[in-house]
Amino acid sequence: MDKQVSSRSTKEKALRLNLDDKKYGTIVEIGAGQEVARNFFVAGAAAGTIAKTMSAYDMKFSDAIYGVQQNGRYVSKGRVLAMMEQEYDLVVERVADVRSRSSRYFSYAATVAAKSFNRDNECHAWCGVRVQMYPGAEPSNIVVHVRMFDDNAEAQQHALGILGVNLIYGSYYYFEDPKKLIDSLTDNMKANRIEIDSIEFQGPYFEDIDNKAKNIHLIRSWKTRAVMFKPDGSIGVPAEMLYKKNVLTIRGSFKPVTKLNVDMIEQGQKAFSELEGVDIDNTILIAEISLNDLQGHDANMSEKDILERVRLLNLLGYNVLVSDYTRYFSLRAYFRQFTNHQIGIVVGMINIKQIFDVEFYRGLEGGILEGFGKLFPDNTRLFVYPELDDKGVLNDLSNVTVPSNLRYLYRHLVENDFIKGIETSNIDLFSIYSREILKQLARGSDEWQQALPDTVVAEIIKHKLFGYRG
């Protein structure tokens, strides 16, 4: 997950900032040393940029300085925002009347859970910068959530030190091009050391920025494999949303989301809820859109196209995951990073045929057996929705045709409930085809409306989505 956009080293970036006497601020870091500040001091001339550095490690000290956030967490978005705001206000209050009026102030903050000694903990951080884009302007914020993959605290500190310099540098030199800023966040860092799974631009300068679009760019910039959106459209942090949750997901193009899609989800929910330990309070339902369709159907979809789909799914109350995963076992592995509870994946009959196609596993050393080993190792099940064939016959798990050399493997998975059939609530739903709906939308006819939920119909008409002409 690395994409270089700048030829400047970390030291050169820090030095350029240090030598610019118009940029001035504070750096506060909790939980992983003071690596960001150290980079500025090592570069030289740091007195030109740094008003103060600090680490309030003790909880009592930290609470006394920054207050107690509503959720009580120290490594949280609320805490990093409190740190940024407090420190920014202090630097302006204390030096604005003695420094040049052309000064542009900033505060950088990070609150981190790094690798603990002799403990296998989740290693992540909230980092942010509060900065004046122009002298005298009201400040704006850039906040990121980071996961660290180095296996020791020292290496994680080093990675966060680079990230912090890149974030401060980008906030000053790339703020007019947020995509370039995102691309630059892993400059001078080897691949797969960190993952940035959410970013948010806040404040007066970024009022017109669509944060959902910028989070999708995190995937295309190789900063993460997936981003999540809550039903209200806000950016979600997977580790927080999935922690100790049962996960039920369905993959689709959702262009647009139809009554057939909704029935698949509802029938999958019904079957999933019958599993031990699954109830409405400890389960999260996720609609997934893959940017990496194996057939290449969606590989080049525009951000506008993706966001239209996300918006409609959110309107129906669904959480949405946008990912670049191709195979289902990769999707399962993604969820398993955050929860050890039940995982259910709702699929159609066409997906079952694909899963039992050996060509689907080309490139895997262990072929189809390796694929199944990764898909069904623990508490993971496929829920299969039936289909209506060209002759009007309803096909389900009882009449699936798989290659003869795989029929015993198929029977094993079905008889041990790794693959479970679900029903349709209405056989007429099989007459719904997304490709036909898109043609109808383009023609401006109204026949498509019967195939979609009412709220989706209203939104498409209101905003003329998917080429609707009205």
Image (spheres, rainbow, N blue to C red):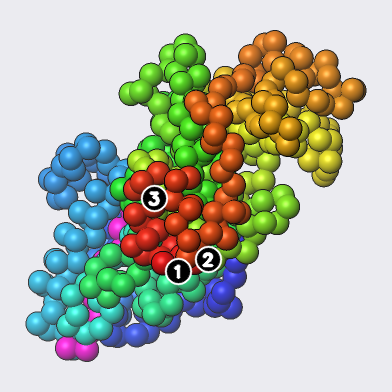
The residue to which callout 1 is attached is: 469
Q: Reply yes or no: does residue 127 show up in magenta.
A: no
Q: Nearer the viewer, mark 3 or mark 2?
A: 2
Q: Residue 166 in the image: state x and y as whole percent.
A: 45, 68
Q: Residue 282 in the image: state x and y as whole percent.
A: 37, 24
Left or right relative to 380: residue 148: left
| Cα distance in 3D space between marks 3 and 2 | 18 Å
Which residue is located at x 42 percent, y 72 percent?
Answer: 178
The answer to which of 190 and 249 lies nearer the viewer is: 249
Q: Where is 336 relative to 198, above or below? A: above
Q: Which portion, as a residue range, is magenta?
A: 101-113
Q: Nearer the viewer, mark 1 or mark 3?
A: 1
| Cα distance in 3D space between marks 1 and 3 | 16 Å
Q: Amino acid at mark 1?
A: Arg
The residue to which callout 3 is attached is: 456
Which sits earlier in the primary sequence, circle 1 or circle 3?
3
* Dot 3: element: helix
| Cα distance in 3D space between marks 2 and 1 | 7 Å
Tell me, yes or no, whether the two marked residues, 1 and 3, touch with CB atoms within 8 Å: no
Which residue is located at x 56 percent, y 74 percent?
Answer: 5
Q: Where is 162 relative to 397, above or below? A: below
Tell me, yes or no, whether the two marked residues, 2 and 1, touch with CB atoms within 8 Å: yes
Which sits earlier in the primary sequence, circle 3 or circle 2?
2
Left or right relative to 198: residue 81: left
The residue to which callout 2 is attached is: 443
Q: Amino acid at mark 3?
A: Val
Q: Is residue 193 visible?
A: no
Left or right relative to 379: residue 95: left
Query: What is the crowding at mark 2: few (fewer than 14 residues within 10 Å), some, or many (at least 20)?
Result: few
For the C terminus, give its image quadrant. Answer: bottom left
Q: Residue 351 in the image: state x and y as whole percent.
A: 69, 36
* Dot 1: element: loop
